[in-house]
Image: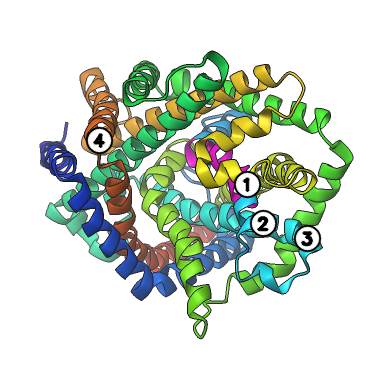
């Protein structure tokens, strides 16, 4: 345990949880105002930075620096490619794929974004999917890759502590070993725990909805707290058994279940239509990529409001999650080359996400066009139920709703145990295998915070508070990018000299 990180983090978490739960409405008002102000005044910074991160990562991939290994030159990858993909996918955005795969395309179709109004009505489903791909594709994964690559490089190749402070060595130098490093690690722990806790609380609502469809279980706070408790128990067991056992096993099991469900829906649904749609959607995404990545609607206030509520909000969310997800991705990527890392963390997950969103999203759009209001009415009333109404339209719907609910649970368990592993590592000063009691403490605290805020209110306000962390992180990531590039230049010179 590193006391200068562990204790301040714990005190801050208890204090913020107490304050938010006690005055949830006031806190939500304050954090909403802060978030709106930041989005209005600094949304342009998020927007430009995310595209720069993507261009930077792709440039590194094709550069000579791509030959460098994240570790010693002779090291082999610690995990197989299958295990690697399963773990990074589950930690990265797995639960969002179930939560929004039906809801977001329907929302874009029925409440058209300014971007969509320029297209004929018959083309809007295609471009609704392109817009969804934009929010869930290359941009967020590039942001995660930037943090993950930096940490893996400085920790595995430059032998620095495996904590977030190490990525700021080019900026702070030896100061990362003092109070400035402690502050960085404390912020990373607090933002990670609250990010996962709020997701647990919100996700419990979707699991509760699935169980309600299956077993007519009442949807209330007591049931949601029980769900959070069960998820926390499994996550605790998983993180205690370690990365190479519990976390690896659950991630692989979850990927097989999720992909199996997707392939079954592909086979039972309009298969040929979906395969054409996958290509169509990718082409639409590529054709509009430059426009979507470069338009800030500076002279259109209505479009700016939409962009702040969708794209800028997504970018803030991905940036705020980048320390947690990036650190976990770094932990499982030792021994891979920089080129292999970037391709594996940006291109492959994006293509899989595109296929997933096509099977669920394009099918949902076809249902909506064939039976107007079938899904849009549900989405407008309760996003958490959209997936289950969608699955009801298939043969063997009970089986799919059950599989979907189990997959949601597993996604939350893998997110929770991954976050616990990251927090454990940071709080112990970079140790790969912290004390078991510390693992139990952080895993349990995540669930407890989620349950408390669900009971007394404050989940929404805390979610908005977490998003405000994106602004300082975004600024730090910009400096981090330049520092990483300079360090890679120096390292490649050494590599060429010794080769």
Comparing marks 3 and 1, which lies closer to the viewer? 1
Look at the numbered discs 4 and 1 and tell me whether their residues touch, using CB distance below 8 Å.
Answer: no
The one nearer the camera, 152 or 357, is 357
Horizontal side, residue 442 vs residue 242: left or right:
left
Residue that carries the numbered disc 2 in the rendered image: 109
Q: Quadrant of the C terminus?
A: bottom right
User: Would residue 173 be counted in the magenta stretch?
Assistant: no
Residue that carries the numbered disc 4 in the rendered image: 453
Q: Residues within 10 Å of mark 3 (few under 14, many from 20)?
A: some
Residue that carries the numbered disc 1 in the rendered image: 376
Residue 50 in the image: above or below residue 390: below
Look at the numbered discs 3 and 1 and tell me whether their residues touch, using CB distance below 8 Å.
Answer: no
Q: Earlier in the sequence, mark 4 or mark 1?
A: 1
Q: Residues within 10 Å of mark 2 (few under 14, many from 20)?
A: many
Residue that carries the numbered disc 3 in the rendered image: 283
Q: Main secondary structure of the magenta part?
A: helix
Q: Residues within 10 Å of mark 4 (few under 14, many from 20)?
A: many
Look at the numbered discs 1 and 2 and tell me whether their residues touch, using CB distance below 8 Å.
Answer: yes
Q: Earlier in the sequence, mark 3 or mark 2?
A: 2
Residue shown at 86% from the left, 44% from the top: 273
| Magenta-tinted stretch | 91-105
Comparing marks 1 and 2, which lies closer to the viewer? 1
C-alpha separation, residue under disc 1 versus residue under disc 2? 9 Å
Residue shown at 89% from the left, 40% from the top: 272
Q: Earlier in the sequence, mark 4 or mark 2?
A: 2
Residue shown at 66% from the left, 17% from the top: 398
Q: Residue furthest right?
A: 272
Q: Position of residue 322 (x, y in %)?
A: 41, 50
């Amino acid at each position: 345990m590193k006391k200068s990180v562990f204790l301040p983090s714990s005190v801050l978490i208890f204090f913020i949880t107490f304050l938010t739960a006690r005055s949830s409405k006031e806190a939500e008002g304050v954090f909403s105002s802060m978030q709106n102000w930041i989005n209005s005044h600094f949304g342009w910074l998020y927007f430009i930075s995310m595209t720069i991160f993507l261009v930077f990562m792709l440039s590194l991939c094709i550069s000579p620096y791509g030959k460098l290994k994240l570790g010693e030159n002779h090291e082999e990858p610690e995990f197989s490619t299958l295990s690697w993909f399963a773990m990074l996918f589950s930690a990265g955005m797995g639960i969002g794929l179930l939560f929004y795969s039906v809801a977001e395309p329907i929302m874009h179709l029925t409440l058209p974004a300014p971007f969509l109004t320029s297209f004929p009505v018959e083309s809007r489903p295609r471009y609704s999917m392109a817009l969804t791909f934009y929010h869930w594709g290359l941009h967020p994964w590039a942001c995660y890759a930037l943090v993950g690559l930096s940490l893996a490089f400085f920790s595995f190749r430059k032998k620095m502590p495996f904590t977030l402070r190490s990525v700021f060595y080019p900026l702070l130098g030896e100061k990362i070993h003092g109070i400035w490093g402690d502050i960085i690690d404390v912020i990373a722990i607090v933002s990670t725990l609250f990010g996962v806790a709020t997701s647990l609380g919100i996700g419990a609502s979707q699991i509760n909805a699935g169980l309600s469809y299956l077993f007519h279980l009442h949807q209330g706070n007591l049931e949601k707290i029980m769900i959070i408790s069960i998820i926390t128990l499994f996550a605790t067991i998983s993180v205690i058994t370690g990365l190479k056992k519990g976390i690896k096993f659950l991630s692989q099991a979850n990927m097989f279940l999720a992909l199996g469900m997707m392939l079954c829906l592909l086979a039972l649904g309009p298969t040929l239509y979906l395969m054409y749609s996958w290509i169509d959607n990718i082409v639409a995404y590529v054709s509009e990529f430059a426009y979507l990545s470069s338009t800030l609607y500076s002279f259109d206030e209505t479009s700016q409001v939409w962009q702040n509520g969708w794209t800028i909000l997504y970018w803030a969310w991905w940036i705020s999650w980048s320390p947690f997800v990036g650190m976990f991705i770094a932990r499982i990527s030792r021994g891979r080359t920089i080129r292999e890392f970037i391709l594996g963390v940006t291109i492959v997950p994006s293509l899989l996400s595109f296929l997933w969103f096509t099977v669920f999203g394009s099918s949902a759009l076809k249902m909506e066009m064939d039976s107007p209001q079938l899904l849009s009415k549900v989405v407008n009333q309760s996003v958490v139920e959209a997936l289950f109404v969608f699955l009801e339209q298939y043969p063997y719907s009970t089986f799919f709703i059950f599989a979907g609910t189990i997959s949601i649970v597993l996604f939350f368990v893998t997110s929770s145990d991954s976050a616990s592993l990251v927090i454990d590592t940071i709080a112990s000063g970079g140790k790969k295998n912290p004390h078991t009691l510390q693992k139990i403490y952080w895993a349990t605290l995540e669930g407890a915070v989620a349950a408390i805020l669900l009971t007394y209110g404050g989940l929404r306000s805390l979610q908005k508070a977490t998003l405000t962390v994106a602004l300082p992180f975004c600024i730090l990531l910009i400096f981090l990018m330049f520092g990483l590039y300079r360090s890679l230049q120096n390292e490649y010179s050494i590599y060429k000299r010794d080769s």
